[in-house]
Image (tube, coloured by chain):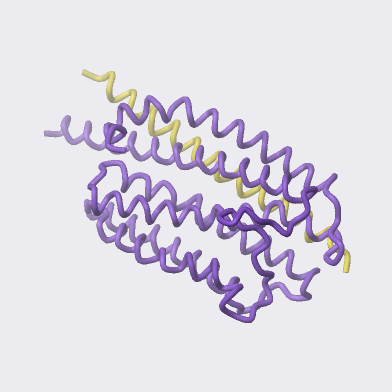
C-alpha cells in the first residue's frame, strides 16, 4: 500500500487544525481586548 | 503563584510572552515538520509511514499535557483558591481537545498502511478516545456553569476526576495486550529506543508544538480576562 496519501493527509490535517485554532483564538483575543479597551476609555 | 493572581500583573507578562511563544513555536514546528516530511529517514519495518510520527506523537503528548494542566489548575482553584486557576483550566480545554483529536486522526491514518486497520479497540486508542470525550464534557460543563454565574467548582472537580485517565493511557501498552506499540522514550529514566536521526526531529517538533500550545493558552486566558472586564464594566454602567 502506498503510504504517501496517508502521510500527506496527516500533515495537512495537523497544519489545517493548528492554523484554524490559532487564527480563531487570536481573532477572539483581539476582539475582546479591543472591546475592553474601548469601554475603559469611556467616562 | 499567587503573585500572578493579579490579572494586571499576569497580563504584563502574558502580552509579550504570547508573541514569543507563538512565533518561536511556529518556526520550530514548521522546521521540524519539513524535516520529518522531506528529509527524515524511513524506518526499517514501517517504511515511509513513520513520518507521521512527527505529528502524531507531539499531539498525543500535548493532549495528555492539556489534561494534566487542567487537573493542576483545578487543584489550585479548589485548594488554594487561586483567582486565575479557573481561567487557566478553561483556556487549556480547547487546545487540549484539538491536539487529542489530531492524535486520534493522525494515528488512524498511520494505522491503515502500518497495521492494515484505521482503528482497534485496544487499550491505548480507547483510552485516548475517552480523553477526547472527557474534554468535550469539560467544555460543556464549563460553559453551563459560566452561564449560570457559577465559580466553576463543578468543572474543577470534573477536571481532577478525569485525571484518572492519564495513567490509564500511559500504562495501557504495559497492562494490556495492545496493537499500539510500547513505550519507546522515557523521560524519567532518560532512555530511548529511537535512533537519533528520528529522535531529535521528534523532540524539536514536540517543543515547537508545545510553545504554540502555550501561546494558544495565553491567548485564550487573555480573551476571558478581557471579556470578564467588559462584563464587569457593563454591570457598573448599568447600576
How many marks do you count on the picture? 0
Indicate whether B95 appears above or below B123. Answer: above
Residue B7 at x, y = what percent? Answer: 30, 32
Q: Is residue B142 left or right of residue B105?
A: left
The chain painted purple is: B
The chain painted yellow is: A
Q: Is residue A27 left or right of residue B79?
A: right
B183 and A34: which one is in front? B183
Residue B20, located in which quarter of the rendered image?
top right
Q: Is residue B29 left or right of residue B67?
A: right
In the rendered image, the quadrant that contains the N terminus of chain B is top left
B39 and A11: which one is in front? B39
Residue B128 at x, y = what percent? Answer: 55, 67
Indicate whether B101 appears above or below B119. Answer: above
Residue B191 at x, y = what percent? Answer: 66, 56
Residue B159, located in which quarter of the rendered image?
bottom left
Q: Residue furthest left?
A: B239
The residue sitting at 44% across, 37% down in the picture is: B218
Q: Is residue B144 left or right of residue B108?
A: left
The residue sitting at 73% across, 50% down in the picture is: B199
Q: Residue furthest bottom?
A: B177
Residue B44, located in which quarter of the rendered image?
bottom right
B151 and B233: which one is in front? B151
In the rendered image, the quadrant that contains the C terminus of chain B is top left
Residue B63 at x, y = what percent? Answer: 53, 56
The residue sitting at 80% across, 69% down in the picture is: B113
Amino acid at each position: 500500500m502506498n503510504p504517501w496519501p496517508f502521510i500527506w493527509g496527516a500533515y495537512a490535517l495537523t497544519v489545517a487544525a493548528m492554523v484554524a485554532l490559532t487564527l480563531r483564538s487570536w481573532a477572539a483575543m483581539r476582539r475582546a481586548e479591543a472591546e475592553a479597551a474601548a469601554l475603559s476609555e469611556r467616562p | 503563584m499567587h503573585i500572578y493572581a493579579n490579572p494586571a500583573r499576569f497580563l504584563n507578562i502574558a502580552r509579550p510572552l504570547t508573541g514569543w511563544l507563538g512565533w518561536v513555536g511556529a518556526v520550530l514546528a514548521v522546521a521540524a515538520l519539513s524535516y520529518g516530511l522531506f528529509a527524515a529517514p524511513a524506518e526499517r519495518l514501517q517504511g515511509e509511514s513513520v513520518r507521521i510520527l512527527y505529528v502524531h506523537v507531539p499531539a498525543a503528548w500535548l493532549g495528555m499535557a492539556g489534561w494534566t494542566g487542567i487537573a493542576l489548575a483545578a487543584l489550585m482553584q479548589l485548594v488554594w483558591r487561586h483567582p486565575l486557576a479557573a481561567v487557566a483550566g478553561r483556556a487549556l480545554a480547547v487546545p487540549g481537545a484539538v491536539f487529542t483529536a489530531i492524535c486520534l486522526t493522525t494515528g488512524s491514518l498511520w494505522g491503515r498502511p502500518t497495521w492494515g486497520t484505521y482503528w482497534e479497540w485496544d487499550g491505548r486508542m480507547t483510552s485516548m478516545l475517552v480523553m477526547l470525550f472527557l474534554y468535550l464534557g469539560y467544555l460543556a460543563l464549563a460553559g453551563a456553569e459560566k452561564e449560570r454565574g457559577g465559580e466553576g467548582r463543578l468543572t474543577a472537580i470534573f477536571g481532577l476526576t478525569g485525571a484518572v485517565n492519564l495513567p490509564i493511557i500511559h500504562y495501557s501498552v504495559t497492562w494490556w495486550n495492545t496493537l499500539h506499540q510500547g513505550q519507546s522514550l522515557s523521560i524519567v529514566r532518560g532512555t530511548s529506543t529511537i535512533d537519533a536521526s528520528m529522535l531529535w526531529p521528534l523532540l524539536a517538533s514536540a517543543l515547537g508544538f508545545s510553545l504554540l500550545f502555550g501561546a494558544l493558552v495565553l491567548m485564550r486566558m487573555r480573551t476571558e480576562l478581557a471579556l470578564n472586564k467588559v462584563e464587569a464594566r457593563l454591570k457598573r454602567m448599568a447600576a
